[in-house]
Amino acid sequence: MISVIKGEIYSIAPGSITVMAGGVGYLINIPSGAELNLKTGQDATISTVLISKEESLELYGFPDPRQKEIFSLLISVSGVGPKTAMNIISGTEPNRFLDEVVSENINYLCSLPGIGRKSAQRIVLELKEKIMKHYPRQIKGVSVPAEDAVQALITLGYSDSQARKVISGIKADNVEDLIRQALREMSA
């Protein structure tokens, strides 16, 4: 597997570049628009994924290693091939993509190139848990446990703004502790 190529950019075309490394020119498919930030003769380090097809081997490359992670996630979804994955990556930022999948924002996913409603639903279904497990991070400014705690407080009858205001001032590692502390503060 070729996971990284470091060399000089030999040529640039829309959606692809050729990188010279060790006397060999590697044709690498890149996200649309990424070529705008590259120059011929420039040294580059490109994270890559090698895809084997019946008739050929194709390299898909990413100047941003986070894009490679998203690409690998996307091609694991049934019905999403490398070209569709590249279209998606070309149309979004990695962190926003992760946020929208976890938030189950089907409308946003449908707005990405090459994604219909069924594909968007499949992406959410197959990737949401993986993303939450492997990418513990802030989702739209609120941690996942905090978001769960906010939803629990809303179910208990508090307004969304009350719940978010109280939860934002509490530091806890899990949903249960967040809810307990929030209820104490709200009843005080």
Image (tube, helix red, strand yellow):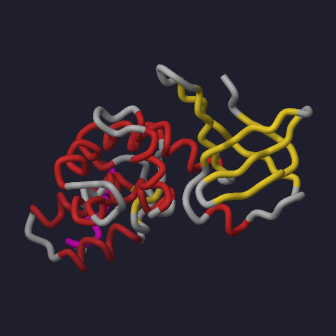
Q: Residue at x 47, y 46 (%)?
A: 136
Is residue 184 covered in magenta? yes
Q: Position of residue 41 (x, y in %)?
A: 89, 58
Q: Residue at x 17, y 58 (%)?
A: 152
Q: Quadrant of residue 114?
A: bottom left
Q: Nearer the viewer, residue 89 or 51?
A: 51
Q: Quadrant of the C terminus?
A: bottom left
Q: Residue at x 59, y 49 (%)?
A: 66
Q: Position of residue 79 (x, y in %)?
A: 29, 36
Q: How many marks?
A: 0
* Secondary structure mostly taken by the magenta-highlighted segment of the chain: helix
Which residue is outermost to the bottom? 161
Q: Nearer the viewer, residue 40 or 119?
A: 40
Q: Position of residue 28 (x, y in %)?
A: 66, 43
* In the rendered image, the vertical position of residue 87 relative to residue 78, given as above or below: below
Q: Nearer the viewer, residue 126 or 115?
A: 115
Left-right relation of 159 to 51: left
Which residue is outermost to the front? 55
Range drawn in magenta: 177-187
Q: Quadrant of the N terminus?
A: top right
Is residue 59 covered in magenta? no
Q: Position of residue 126 (x, y in %)?
A: 28, 37
* In the rendered image, the vertical position of residue 158 relative to residue 15, given as above or below: below
Q: Residue at x 30, y 59 (%)?
A: 109
Left-right relation of 184 to 171: left
